[in-house]
Amino acid sequence: MHIMPQIKPITIYRLAWRNLAQKPFRTTCLIIMTLLFSASLFGGSILTKNLNDGIAGMANRLGADILIVPYGYEKELEVALLRGEPSTFYLKADLAQKIEKIKGITAVSSQLFIASLSAGCCTSKLQLIGFEQSTDFVISPWMKQQLTARLHDNEVVVGSKILADVGDEITFFNHRFRVAAKMDSTGMGFDTSVFMTMDAAYNLMKTADLLSGDVDHIRNYVSSIFIRVDHDYQPKAIVNQIMQKYAVEYNLDFVMTKVMISDIYKWLNSFSVIVYTLAAIFWLLAIVVIFIVYSSTINERKREVGILRILGASRSMLVKMLFIESFIISVIGAIIGIIFATIVLCAFSMLICQSLGLPCINASFSSAITYGLIVFILTLIIAPLASSYSVLSITRTDSYQAYREGE
Amino acid sequence: MLLEVKNIRKQYQRQTLFCAVDNVSFSLQQRDYACIMGRSGSGKTTLLNIIAGISTPTQGRIIIDNTDIAPFDDEQASQFRNQTIGYVPQGSSLLTNLTAMENICLPYYLYSKNKQPDNIECCNKRAQQLMQMAEISHLSEIYPNQMSGGEMRRVAIVRALICSPKLLLADEPTNDLDDESSRQIMQLFSGLHSQGTTILLVTHDHEVANYASKHFKMEAGKLTDYS
Ligand SMILES: Nc1ncnc2c1ncn2[C@@H]1O[C@H](COP(=O)(O)OP(=O)(O)O)[C@@H](O)[C@H]1O
Ligand SMILES: [Mg+2]
């Protein structure tokens, strides 16, 4: 006599699973269709949010309204500012004192950029910057804790991505510096910058043979001048004044930070349009493909459903079974897609932002959950919606009335 | 009276209105073993589907075990079919993604009250007994694609019996089977009949018809008494 193994009751749910498992290729393809949507929408919208937050943060804390640079260098400055691409350019330093006197300007601070690809300390590129602590309004908003004392010539403030902490010593061109302060993450070029006093910067340039020719002369130069404008004045009007008076003599160019940021926002807008259009295309594509795949198997499913019908399954049970099946496809597609996008974002989000040359702030856990939920729900709709026509026509009363085979 | 078929008519809309079952009436007593003979296309399957409640007749009434299912909604009719009628459909009717044992127990678990542990035990026992009787115990873990035609048919018969139906319908149960398999199946039916099951089977094979005690003939939708 045979010992019969105890079997688990075959339920509508188990039937749905079995049906999916029986056609692994078809099931995988359908899951991939839904996954394309969930991954692209989740990944794309989180990336857009990261960029948006990064730019908003930058716009908030970038205290300067106008940046003055030598003629032809405004792109270089933007790149240096946003991406931290090391660069060097020079402007006569006495301009700062002249500009200060213009009405409507509340603060002026100069910086000297030293390109130092070859700096001994660090493997990745970094920008050495001399800044005027007494006039500075550019760096201090990002400081983790404000400097209480004056920065000494052998001290530096480092950006958030520089691998050194307060109290550490780092060496550039055989000069040893003590880290006096560290900045918050800015998402900008500042993250890979090292700030020192102007004197220290001049000194470094001189002794490290970074310049040829008239080395002593370097003290008369800076790289860019950061200007803050009174709220009651139009930055545009101030720029016009500066350019009229000094453009020719000093060979000047300028960057208006508002314009720069609104340009970035414009770019971000078209980026998000692309992201959402792509997601919408994937959504429709998934629906169309699943619709076609389901429609093409209607007859084959009618047979199976006809058998279940004969065994006493009601129409609502069969509708439930078929919808559970497509629901499972959507759920798996949504989960895998979101997990996949999360992994890609964790691994590459910063890299993507950097290569876009834009500041980025990682989305908070709660906003990631919110986005995830929305994407999850939109993905959940896909397969049940796409299969609804087939499900209804498979289970329509009398569609299986004649279970007739081989006639 | 276990089964009363009264003036059943089924029309299909083809090029013209076409009558697949034409004013059929007959009745079966408890423990009857009846057989409907007829050529392919004469309306036998259509009639069985109407008796089973899968297809609604254009006209007429079906009364099974003193119950008229016409006023039932789908849910009630399905449950009635599940518990009162065992139907062995034409051709291969096993679900290919389930083993023999799972196929057999499937009808039993369609209604949730049967999923309690005691009932699962009960179903397994009954399946076991029926499989032994049909000599397919060795197939319980086997999937349909590894069975012969005769084995599949016997699994389908056992499946039709799992809920202890009052009426067993079988649509050409020996079609496309070899003589030995046919004999096995007909012996199975005889055994069931002697245990008290009411059987209505459809065939176009005279030898098979000989097992039955009541005979009907179906021709172009019309049923005539034959015995
Ligand atoms: N759903 C349907 N629509 C139209 N005609 C049908 C349908 N089902 C069956 N028929 C026709 O009804 C007739 C009887 O079919 P059926 O009952 O399957 O015959 P049998 O089982 O005796 O071979 C056939 O001519 C068949 O073509
Ligand atoms: Mg038939």
Image (spheres, coloured by chain):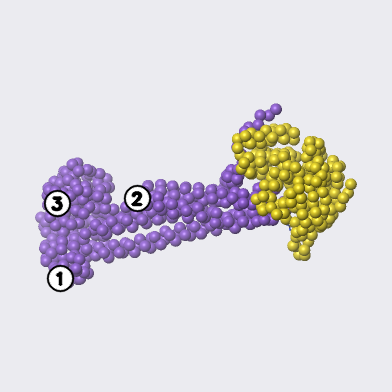
Q: Is mark 1 within 8 Å of ligand 1?
A: no
Residue nearest the viewer, comparing A112 with A109: A109
Residue pictured at 34% horizontal, 56% vertical = A51
Q: Which mark is residue A245?
A: 1
Amino acid bearing label 3: Thr
User: Separation of disc 3 and disc 1 at Cα?
Assistant: 29 Å
Q: Quadrant of residue A357?
A: bottom left
Residue A124: percent from left, percent from top: 27, 47
Residue pictured at 26% horizontal, 53% vertical = A186
Instruction: Nearest to the eye among marks 3 and 2: give it.
Output: 2
User: Separation of disc 3 and disc 2 at Cα?
Assistant: 36 Å
Residue at label 2? A364
Residue nearest the viewer, comparing A383 with B54: B54
Q: Earlier in the sequence, mark 3 or mark 1?
A: 3
Q: Which chain is yellow?
A: B
Q: Which chain is purple?
A: A
Amino acid bearing label 1: Lys
Residue furthest out toward the right? B227
Q: Is B128 displayed left or right of A11 in the figure?
A: right
